[in-house]
Amino acid sequence: MSEAVLYRVRLPMATPFDHPAARRTTSDSLVLRIGVDGVYGLGECAPRRYVTGETSDGVIAALCRLPMDALLARIEHTPPADLLRRLRAQGFTATFGIDGGNNLVCLLETAVLDLLGHRLGLTARELIGADRDAGERLAVSQVLDLSIGVEEFLASRGPFHFVKVKASDDIARDARTVRAIRDHVGDGVAVMVDANMSWTPANAPSRARRLRECGADLIEEPLPSRDWANLRALRRVAGLGIMLDESVCTLEDARSAVAAGACDALNVRIAKNGGLLRAARLVDFARANGLAFQIGVQVAEVGPLINAGRALAFGSRDAMTVEAGQSDRFFPDMIVAPPPAVDRRTNTIAPAAGPGLGIRLNENADRWAVLRFTGSGTGWQRTALAAR
């Protein structure tokens, strides 16, 4: 028997997160639980209109148009090892004959991979072809957003291995912030400023030079998305490395960026880049083209995405830095167990234990269920919560 349940998770955040493109006070993730013959898998996506143009409403509508019964039947009747081999070789859309936006693919693929991990007894790292032995811990970066001041950040968020600063609309403030951080952490810790596409070709060169003089090493996504010519020109005069995030949602975007000479590094995020397998391919592309890369997160991931990102991170120990998110700070009552942890004494993470993504839904998830699919010919049905 096959089934699926979709959860739209809008958990209130204990602390907000502010940056130039958005202010977030709740999560907005879709979590999919699929079951085949009593074995279950969890997937997640976190659509952000300003990143990929997708929204949760749009992903839900696209999911409801899919032949879900055929997808579940394919999982049920294909030997798990054969299905995993096809996914690795062909990707999710070719394997299942299903196309869609990056977040829809991410939602489905992470759920299928988690289920296959449980069926085959494989960790998420092994599912993407990485070694089981991932090492004990990874250091993670710390992000200063606009909701707290630099003094509080420096006093409470260390130790620091890599620092990202979310830019404000005041370059003088950003320069003071970078200088304060550089004076505090010394020369051995990289400092990056993320402008989230808020600069212009006219003001970007002077802003970049000012931040460089104050101790910044990189700038992330300074200009409007995919402005290849101006990114190339800025890279030539800035004296700082340029990391691209919103500009690179697909492998084709990455090829265009490299062809234009527009970047030095990529921010790889599971949901933005269309799932764990596509993200892993983007990491391979970065390596092959001499680019640095970061394993990043969407703000306010709620469970499966967190552990998917960590699987990629532990399979990519040459990443320049890893973001672990702040779910432990944002959400006192998470919807998964065990909750993904960060050791805040050392700002490090450990690989998830167990098969698949290494988590399950707990009772806190029940209230967020919105759609159920039973394969009975009736399609997706609203749950009691969604009907209210």
Image: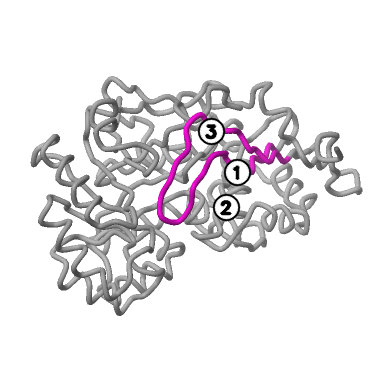
Queried whether the magenta region covers residue 102, the answer comes back as no
Residue underneath mark 2: 47
Instruction: Answer yes or no: is residue 287 visible.
Output: no
Residue 5, given in percent of the width and then of the height, sits at 75, 38
The alpha-carbon separation of the residues under discs 2 and 3 comes to: 17 Å
Taken as a whole, is the magenta stretch helix, strand or loop?
A: strand
The answer to whether marks 1 and 2 mark residues whose Cβ atoms lie closer than 8 Å is: yes
| The image quarter in which residue 372 lies | top right
Pair 1/3: label in front:
3
Question: Label 3 sits on what residue type?
Answer: Met
Count of all numbered marks drawn on residues in the image: 3
Badge 2: residue crowd in 10 Å (few <14, some 14–19, many ≥20)? many
Specify the segment rendered in magenta. 6-33
Disc 3 is placed on an element classified as: strand
* Badge 1 density bin: few <14, some 14–19, many ≥20, Cα 10 Å: many
* Quarter containing the C terminus: top right
| Local SS, label 1 | loop
| Label 3: few (<14), some (14–19) or many (≥20) C-alpha neighbours in 10 Å | some
Q: Position of residue 294 (x, y in %)?
A: 31, 49
Q: Quadrant of residue 131?
A: top left
Residue 13, disc: 3
* 304 or 217: nearer the viewer: 217
Residue at 58 percent across and 55 percent down: it is 92
Q: Residue at x 17, y 61 (%)?
A: 240
Q: Which residue is mark 1?
A: 28
Question: Could you tell me the amino acid type at mark 2?
Answer: Pro
In this picture the colour scheme is: one colour
Residue type indicated by callout 1:
Asp
Residue 27 within the segment the image draws in magenta: yes
